[in-house]
Image (spheres, rainbow, N blue to C red):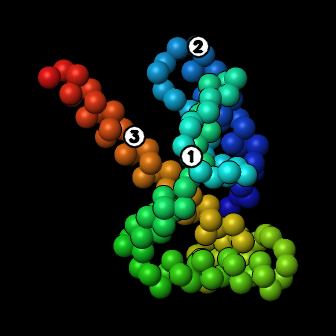
Amino acid sequence: YHPEQAARIDTCVNALLKQWHTLETNVELMDVAPTNNNKRKILVKDENHIIHAPLLEDELQYARHILTKTHGEEYVTNLEQKCRNFREKEGKDGFIGYVDDDDDTFVTTDSYNVCLGATAVWIRAVDFVLERKEEEEEEES
């Protein structure tokens, strides 16, 4: 068991940026972190060529739908409530406990939101790849 470290994200992004600049690839890096304005109409690239495109509410709702099809409504709802109730009751963020009593997978107040966001990003990535593939096939025709 090891706690998650925010520095891992920075390390990974920096390694990807180094590869991106070295290989001059057409791979696009995308930051999906929330902003003050979560309406993604225009994608903005920063100085590192990272596209800032926060997840939209409909993407998160669809991700929840997929999670409930995979894990069941009760399981997803219990995780969501466990995270939110602890935060409201204790008034702080952090470690809550474990998914199951005999499990080594720990839960924090952010676990539900992280799971939901990660699922939404995977769905977006798959959609992006499939759209690119369709575009390439149309160009070849």
Q: Earlier in the sequence, mark 2 or mark 3?
A: 2
Q: Nearer the viewer, residue 57 or 76?
A: 57
Say what secondary structure mark 2 lies in: helix
Of the residues shown, which amino acid type is indicated by label 2?
Thr
x and y percentages locating residue 28 in the rendered image: 52, 29
Task: Kindly indicate whether the residue at mark 3 contacts the one at mark 1 (C-beta within 8 angstroms).
Answer: no
The span from disc 2 to disc 3 (Cα, nearest Å) is: 24 Å
Question: Label 1 belongs to which residue?
Answer: 40
x and y percentages locating residue 125 in the rendered image: 44, 44
x and y percentages locating residue 83 in the rendered image: 68, 77
Q: Earlier in the sequence, mark 2 or mark 1?
A: 2
Say what secondary structure mark 1 lies in: loop
Question: Label 3 belongs to which residue?
Answer: 128
x and y percentages locating residue 36 in the rendered image: 73, 52
- The quadrant holding residue 133 is top left
Question: Label 2 belongs to which residue?
Answer: 22
Q: Tell me the quadrant of the picture where the C terminus can be found.
A: top left
The span from disc 2 to disc 1 (Cα, nearest Å) is: 29 Å
| Pair 2/1: label in front | 1
Q: Residue at x 42, y 74 (%)?
A: 68
Say what secondary structure mark 3 lies in: helix
The span from disc 1 to disc 3 (Cα, nearest Å) is: 15 Å
Checking the image for residue 17, the label placed there is none
Compared to residue 6, the image places residue 23 above or below, namely: above
